Amino acid sequence: MEKILQVKDLELSFHTFAGEVKAIRGVSFDLNKGETLAIVGESGSGKSVTTKSIMRLLPESSSEFKNGQILFNNNDLTKLPEKEMQKIRGKEISMIFQDPMTSLNPTMPIGKQVMEPILKHQKVGKAKAKEVAIDLLKMVGIPNAENRYKMYPHQFSGGQRQRIVIAIALACNPKVLIADEPTTALDVTIQAQILELMKDIQKKVDTSIIFITHDLGVVANVADRVAVMYGGRIVEVGTVDEIFYNPQHPYTWGLLVPCHRWILKRKDFMQFLVHRRIY
């Protein structure tokens, strides 16, 4: 398969008052065209820092790339000037953040917020940008998009706000879409709808997705491959079946124990747990 993004031996540190903190320690993974790669691990394992380093969203004053490469379009993103990154960020690599209320500008109509990346990265006028924005809102399931285009974020439900954030991320048909726990703040019913929406959108726009989560139930529903992170390192990579039914690392076994009941009820999985002596 064609590799669209490659992370090689990435090391990143933060400089704090207490000294240097090594946040990412030799992380390597590939993202293939059209696939969904899930990065899983507990809070503080380095999932979000890894993906924000791909987008170069970490503060340069306190963070530093110590080693490694992030290869995209034959460029090493760790060495690109900020002006060049601005051409990639939001256009070819986009990100869906965890909390839509902190991602959306509360003082700005949602239509203008969807239009913003279109006007910045595509050579179109405002009328065409508005048309594209309304089409995007329809695609992500915002009802009556033509009339709600001028409404503000607080006038939408939590699930609808997340759909708007997805529309913004998809505005320029990015090659890579990074989703940083996009369903954590939503209830179970809306979570399922958002996950189904993302799978449908991936088929329509042919994008590759990096999905960050700590929920293995989500992984089972959306991912093609899984990378398990612990302590700033990727300790295991495999297909969903390999990770769920033949995990190799003790940390992965620990993640699987409290997994969803529908998995634990499966006899073959229970036999695996008993065999590994972790249940």
Image (cartoon, grey):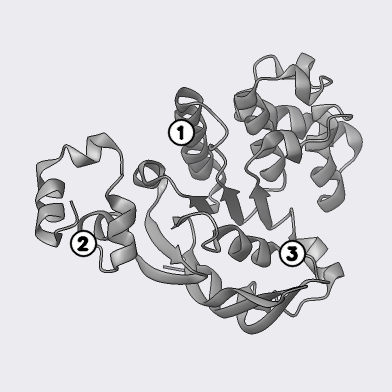
Mark 3 vs mark 1: give the one in front.
3
Looking at the picture, how far across and down is residue 184, in whole percent? 54, 38
**Element marked by disc 1:** helix
At 55% from the left edge and 52% from the top edge, which residue is drawn?
207
Quote the CA–CA distance across marks 1 and 2. Answer: 27 Å
Quote the CA–CA distance across marks 2 and 3. Answer: 35 Å
Looking at the picture, how far across and down is residue 75, in whole percent? 68, 77
**Disc 2 designates what residue?**
246
User: Residue 54, relative to residue 271: is it above or below?
Assistant: below
* Tag of residue 58: 3
Q: Is residue 52 visible?
A: yes
The tag earlier along the polypeptide, 3 or 1, is: 3
Quote the CA–CA distance across marks 3 and 1. Answer: 30 Å
- Specify whether 56 is left or right of 259: right
**Disc 1 designates what residue?**
196
Mark 1: amino acid: Glu
